[in-house]
Image (tube, rainbow, N blue to C red):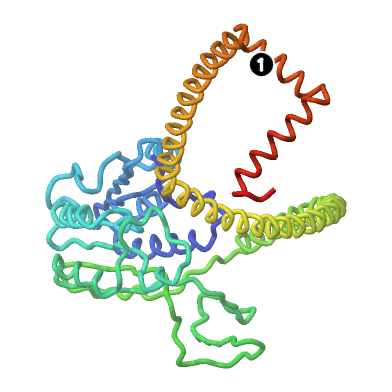
Amino acid sequence: MEVERIETKSKDYVELLFHWHRYLIAQEFVTGKVVLDIACGEGYGAYQLSKQAKEVIGMDIDPKTIEIAKNSYVNQNLRFLCGDAKKIEIPNNSIDIIVSFETIEHMNENDQIEFLNEIKRILKPDGILLISTPDKTRTDLFEAKNPFHLREWYKEEFEAILQTLFTNVRIYLQEVNMSSFLWESNNSIDKLLMNKKIKISGEHIDSAPSEEIKNHLYMLAVCSNNEITENIASICHEVNRTPLENLWNRYSEDVAEYQEKIKVLERDKILYLDKLNEYEQELSKLRAEYDGLVNEVEKKKEDVKRFQSQIEFLMEDKERLKKRISYISEHTSTYKDVINSQIKEKEQLWHLLNTVRQEKAIYENQLNEIFAMKSWKLVGIYRAFMDKTLMGRILKKIKNGVFILIGNKGRV
């Protein structure tokens, strides 16, 4: 099961400080008490509480985490069990102190109500609940939202829901900030009571006695039906330099890692610059090809214009042909009638010609019969006499003159 939890081996010292501070505060309440740590994780907090409590039960929903807790933290008055915070297998009114840090925000709204009702059921009437959760007023400012948090609370609504279950609710705000310690060598640092506050703004550092820490991240609620007399306002700090040294070592490791990455990036930069030069040369060739293609496109555009002109001309010619065809179509029937009439006339003429030919043949036959007659031969002898002899020519003139005279009514 993938869950969000803090472990003692974590290098997130800020988050560890948040958690340790809460457990140190909880120690103030647990002396001689029966304590339940809900969502105890690997058990470091439950173990801390067991040093002063009568009995401590550490509960978590993840079986593997509970096994780690059992193997890592052992005490006679400490036991761990696997369980669901919405269905806690513990008798009613049997727990003096319940602690649950950063648990409720991992549930949806219905599960949160069941969880709080379970706490109320198993807590003794005079018992105390210490419960913490992020303040949504702060987390709303985060660009990246925590995917494990199903429902977070604003201070006012967190306090209101707790007041429906407990008579007294006190809300404490928690934040980690940077501090500097100054103490006299012959005195203990525990005797340091003076609280100096500064405000750093750009290059300026000012004393800020009235300034409060703003934008706190966590809320810690102390809830009970009895009056809460304890004031848990406090400052928690690490007295040795291990976290700072670890942070510095981690920073040094990170710097070395980043420097090595920078070397790799420098080498990659040289390779990429060479590639870039190659790409620039290739780009120049492509640009030249592009310019050539642009020129070719311009030529093609001119060709297109020319073709468009030709198309327009052909379209106009097409319209003219359409009109001509329409005209011809309109007059085709008339031409057909004329042609049919001429064909009929031609047929009549052929018929008449055939009739004439037949009549000619008849006349030729008759002429041949006439030419074959003896009388026609005498006519031939007569014509020859008239044409070839002097006497015939004289007689022919006399004959023609007589005819002329007759034709001209007496004129010779």
- For mark 1, what is the residue? 379
> Is residue 390 positioned above or below 4 on the image?
above
Q: Secondary structure under badge 1?
A: helix
Residue at x 24% of width, y 52% of height: 34
> Is residue 390 positioned above or below 298 on the image?
above
* Relative depth, front residue between 62 and 288: 288
Q: Amino acid at mark 1?
A: Val
| 10 Å crowding of disc 1: few (<14), some (14-19), many (20+) | few
The image quarter containing residue 228 is: bottom left
> Is residue 366 positioned above or below 47 on the image?
above
- Residue 250 position in % (x across, y down): 67, 56
In this image, 223 relative to 330: left or right? left
Residue at x 60% of width, y 64% of height: 240
Residue at x 26% of width, y 74% of height: 170
Q: How many marks?
A: 1
- Residue 167 position in % (x across, y down): 14, 71
Q: Is residue 297 visible?
A: yes
- Residue 13 position in % (x across, y down): 54, 60
* Relative depth, front residue between 135 and 82: 135
In this image, 140 relative to 194: left or right? left
> Is residue 4 positioned above or below 242 on the image?
above
* Relative depth, front residue between 348 and 340: 348
The image quarter containing residue 80 is: top left
Q: Is residue 263 visible?
A: no
* Relative depth, front residue between 225 and 328: 328
In this image, 164 relative to 143: left or right? left
The quarter in which the N terminus is drawn is top left
